[in-house]
Amino acid sequence: MPVRVELPYHLRLLAQLASRDVELEIASPVTLTLVLDALEARYPMLRGTIRDHGLQKRRPFLRFYACEQDFSNHPFDEPLPPEVAAGTEPLLIIGGLAGG
């Protein structure tokens, strides 16, 4: 089963996607690194928008969620939940909100 990734509007617009879901074939174990590598390989215009070019750290104001858990500060090489690897639950990339 492919891994499903849901992107926020601004990244969908940049990648010229009509759908909010992207399906990617990822080898097991499924990690954030592998998902982001596959996403950036398919949509090169997203390189540098989700993670920094040099340090490969998550960009501020972006968060990663899977199975109602925040994976934003987890190591990128940590396996994601089996539901994400099986394609039954999506990996959510969410643009943060600021202000007040």
Image (tube, rainbow, N blue to C red):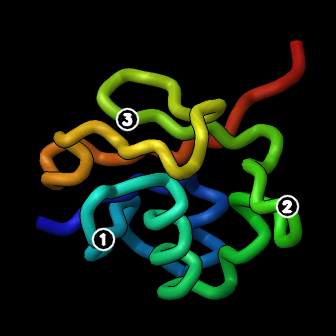
Relative to the observer, which residue lies in front, 77 or 51? Answer: 77
Above or below for 7 versus 11: above
Find the distance from the CA under tag 2 to the CA under tag 3. Answer: 23 Å
At which x and y percent is residue 38? 46, 77
The image shows residue 94 at horizontal and vertical percentages of 57, 41
Instruction: Give left or right: position of 38 versus 13.
Output: left
Position of 18 relative to 29 (above/below): below
- Count neighbours of disc 2 (C-alpha within 10 A) and say few if under 14, some if 14 to 19, many if 20 or more: few
Q: Which residue is mark 3?
A: 66
List the residue tagged with mark 1: 26
Q: CA distance from mark 1 to mark 2?
A: 22 Å
* Location of residue 46 by image quarter: bottom right
Q: Which residue is mark 2?
A: 55
Check the picture and name the quadrant holding the C terminus: top right
- Residue 71 at x, y = what percent? 52, 32
Mark 3 secondary-structure assignment: strand
Determine contact: label 1, label 2, CB under 8 Å.
Answer: no
